[in-house]
Amino acid sequence: MPTVNYNKISHIYDDVRQADIELITHFLAELDLNDAATILDIGCGTGNHTDLLQKVTHSHVYGIEPSAGMLSRARQKNRHVVFQSGDAAHIPFDDDYFDFVYMTDVIHHVPDINSMFAEIKRVLKTNGNVCIVTQSHHQIEQRPIVQFFPGTASVDKARYPDIDQIVAQAAAQSLKFIKTTVLYENQAIELGPEFLELVKKKGYSMLHLIADEEYDEGVKRLETELRYGTIKSTLSGETLVWFIKP
């Protein structure tokens, strides 16, 4: 399977991965994130969530990211956030360091989630929380983009661990499952020119992983349908999987 070069696409990443205010609001409702809290964003990308979370909470916020291109953009956004090179299997911080660890749409890039959860447990304080923001296989199948690029569902179900697998691997590292929360599912949206522009830029990573023929055909169908106006659709949703270190 082809791979995605995030250094190459870092200059358009913010077009796709903008800070999700509702997600941050959900974190704040679930946790006591005061200015003394230590928070880690694994796979922070260009730092959109780390930036917003630090500004809202004034906590000690850290982000790790293996892509130098992504880190370069992240560091331009907020000097109060500590950005470092690292990944889920190699977290460059001491044991028992963080009150809260999260990752947003990153787990499918992790080759060994068992090692990932071992590292998360190591750097998490006792009674610290973990939130894995991802999509179930059912949600992947319901994505609006799948109607134009059906192969993206197959490639992403191969990349994404399903929710029960995430829970099982966390339990193997003695992280206690708390609950799942679903956001945005079946929320009405309209696909318009902005969606087409992102597709043409291949701003969605799974578009780099399908055959060129399918990609070209999907773009043509999308262009044809948009000639008649915006396309009504619904969001497939996100699943938040919550754990605690006992």
Image (cartoon, rainbow, N blue to C red):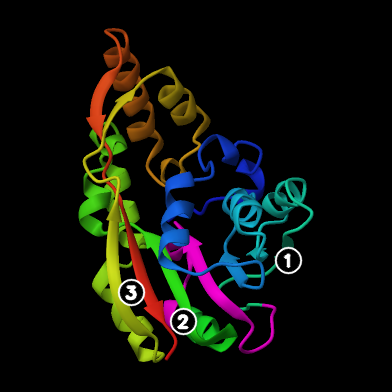
The part of the chain drawn in magenta is 92-114
Q: Position of residue 237 (x, y in %)?
A: 29, 48
Residue, disc 3: 166
Label 3: few (<14), some or many (≥20) within 10 Å?
some
- Residue at point 45%, 52% (across, down): 25
- Residue at point 32%, 21% (across, down): 222
Q: Out of 71 and 215, give the one closest to the viewer.
A: 71
Residue, disc 1: 84
Left or right of 54: which side holds 146?
left
Q: Position of residue 185 (x, y in %)?
A: 24, 46
What quarter of the picture does the C terminus occupy? bottom left
Q: What's the distance in space between the residues labelled 3 and 2, CA to CA? A: 9 Å
Q: Amino acid at mark 2?
A: Phe
Left or right of 168: which side holds 210?
right
Q: What's the distance in space between the residues labelled 1 and 2, CA to CA? A: 19 Å
Residue at disc 1, secondary structure: strand
What quarter of the picture does the N terminus occupy? bottom left
Chain-order first, disc 1 or disc 2: 1
Left or right of 175: which side holds 24?
right
Residue 112 belongs to the span the image colors magenta: yes
Q: Which mark is residue 117?
A: 2
* Residue 150, placed above or below residue 108: above
